[in-house]
Image (tube, rainbow, N blue to C red):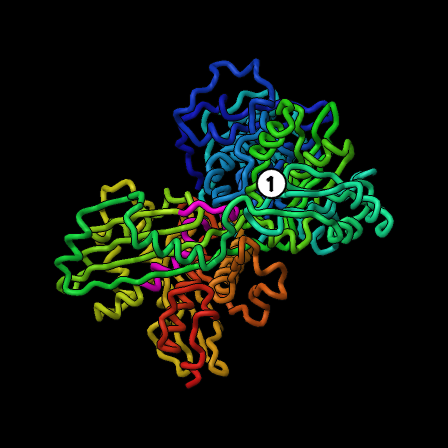
Amino acid sequence: MAVRSNNKFSRRSFLKVTGLAGGGVLIGFNLFSACKSDTEMPKDISELNFNDFNAYIKIADNGKVTIFSPNPEIGQGVKTSMPMIIAEELDVAWEDVYVQQAPLDTEKYVRQVAGGSQSIRASWEPLRQTGASARQMLINAAAAGWDVDPGECTTSNGVITGPGGNRIGYGEVVKDAAGLEVPEEVSLKDPKDFKIIGKDIRNVDINKIITGKPLYGLDYSEEGMLIASVLRPPAFGQELADFQKLENFDAIKKDHPGVVDIIRFENKIAVLAKDTWTAMKAKKTLQANWQYAGNPESTEDHDEILLGLLDGNDFQNMRKDGDVEKAFSEADEVLERTYESPFLPHNCMEPMNFFANVTDEKIHLVGPIQTPEGTANQVAEKLGRPLEEVHLEMTRMGGGFGRRLYGDFVLEAAEISSLAKKPVKVVYSREDDMTAGVYRPAIKYRIKAAVKDGKLTGYHLKEAAVNSNMYNLIPNFFPAGAVENYQVDVANYQSNITTGAWRAPYTNFLAFAEQSFFDELAEVMQVDRVQLHLDLLEKVKGSTDDRIQYSPERMQNVIKTVVEKSGFKNQQEGVYKGFSAYYCHNTHVAEVAEVVLENGQPVTKKVTCVVDCGIVVNRLGALNQIEGGIVDGVGHAMYGDLTFTDGKPESDNFHNYQLIRMMQAPKVETHFIENNLSPTGLGEPTLPVAGGAVANAIKAATGQRIYKQPFIKHLDTKEVIG
């Protein structure tokens, strides 16, 4: 059964189709006007060219389909899943689809960004429309040739079947289709008829990945390219006071053949060499003097400052329902707890790198970046060049997690190339990556709850963070709308230490704090911890508060399902379970962690996860995202800890910064809530929930509540052993 599209935009403003000189058809589609029914488009697009559209599919005269993927690929799978959506509605066999990474093109494409788990959510409807429209045009072309009603024709795997046994492949009608009008209405598939969506589809790059074919920024090279290894301030807040190039250069060239130049720029020094190892070795021998521009900062300073902010009154109010102070004054019981987290580096498997070749004619950039358009604008502004002279190509990324939202390393490459007059690739070492990062900010939360007559009557959340301006989502997540007196306040301290988005911003630490708090609150109220969530969510049903971003019904469903699937209420000797649920990046998730004690140490053995992300586009890719998010969440909650002394990070590689090891990774059992709702993101939502589930399981196992991350640092194992 087909589903009639109810979008009200003009098909003429959405698609443009043209024949290709070499055979086949090229379809340009306006991805984001397709999402907005009120977008004003030109009444006549006959004068427009393909630069006015944001994405392409190409159907060759042999029936093969090329789908151009404009969004950066950071391992979240959009290079596979987004083309799957088009191919499904186009009704072609997946093995006949070829996916090609598109470069940055601000004229042809819109929102070429990887971040916020939004790619699939934003593109679901227009990608389906594109595939369905192309399919209908092919049907119309075949029907015209057979002189039959298009409604009598069907398609399957790139073949059109008409009355009387007529059959023809897409490739045989693409030229005729290119000359037809774009249909005003098309039918979308009923989800029960999906052949590609919902299946296990391998990553389109998997063969290249496992055979070591060039895909990543570190793989990219050009003839005559030099490698730049950059010496940056050893501590945040320092500036370069003195550097004598000639004295350094002569000694370095003698000891390190292959060094070509040394360039001072801004507050940094770059060593240029013919290979990576030579550049990195030579950089370590540079003699430079640094001085602090202000007071050096240490972790102890941040702790004191943030706690002081929580105790003070210098807050920005984000949401205020009712009167929390009155609720506290009238309460039978008040529970107040403070939760603390450290800075965290991103630690992408592929350290930061980027290629730049700045000439008088153009600026050629190649590498891994999550925000290519914004970065290209920064480069143009930095070098004082017109944006149209910047050509940026994207490679696959060996991890992003928010670090590659920031183009600082691209700016370095462009500036060095401009000064050196040569093609240059900046390559970070692991030490560079960890000590010159953009970190998850150190944050402290204070949560206070009022209980009156056995009911939760007041809830006050305070946040104090370093450099954090990411406040716009926190107020409207659970328990917003469930508590009559509810308030969220934020304060921040401006630091020299660079901070920014880290996987699942807004919630990566907040979920642990709130879900740990609710677990303890249930004990204080002497109620079942799961039932406490369900009862509060019941109060949100039917709410007319359009600020609320989560669905109470969907959240209740994932909670009930995870309790059932995990056997949460079934006691097992020596196995201790912790429950947690959260809404993150438009997806509802509930998890139960199972912890055992081994030699007095809590060990997470298993996490059962239930996810409501709507329709699952690529089941295999979805499982990878869910499991990876949980392992990442468990690992950083347990072990992640970056401290500073006088502005200098105390960890610079994995010998003194602990990531979760393979033997420490829990088994993950995943269950999807099956429905036909539009899909939401999966790259981030399972990470925040994991910390709370593990903390609550550790409490069940050891009797200890944990209020600080990393858990391993703040857990009294002597008490457990004793």
Q: Residue at x 54, y 31 (%)?
A: 110
For disc 1, the neighbor class at 10 Å (few under 14, some 14 to 19, many from 20) is some
Q: Residue at x 30, y 54 (%)?
A: 311
Q: Secondary structure at mark 1?
A: helix
Relative horizontal placement of residue 245, taking residue 577 as reference (left or right): right
Q: Position of residue 327 (x, y in %)?
A: 16, 55
Reply yes or no: does residue 161 show up in magenta: no
Q: Residue at x 70, y 35 (%)?
A: 62
Name, please, the residue furthest toward the bottom.
722
Q: Residue at x 54, y 44 (%)?
A: 293
Q: Position of residue 12 (x, y in %)?
A: 50, 21
Disc 1: which residue:
408
From the viewer's perspective, is residue 62 above or below residue 433? above
Given residues 39 and 8, the one toward you in this image is 39
For the C terminus, the image quarter is bottom left
From the viewer's perspective, is residue 214 above or below residue 128? below
**What amino acid is at disc 1?**
Asp
From the viewer's perspective, is residue 694 above or below residue 276? below
From the viewer's perspective, is residue 381 above or below residue 585? above
Given residues 51 and 674, the one toward you in this image is 51
Name the dominant secondary structure of the magenta segment. Answer: loop
Reply yes or no: does residue 510 show up in magenta: yes
Q: In the image, which residues are magenta?
A: 493-517
Relative horizontal placement of residue 229, taking residue 411 as reference (left or right): right
Counting the numbered discs, the total is 1
Relative horizontal placement of residue 691, taking residue 231 as reference (left or right): left
Query: Is residue 63 something that shows in the picture?
Result: no
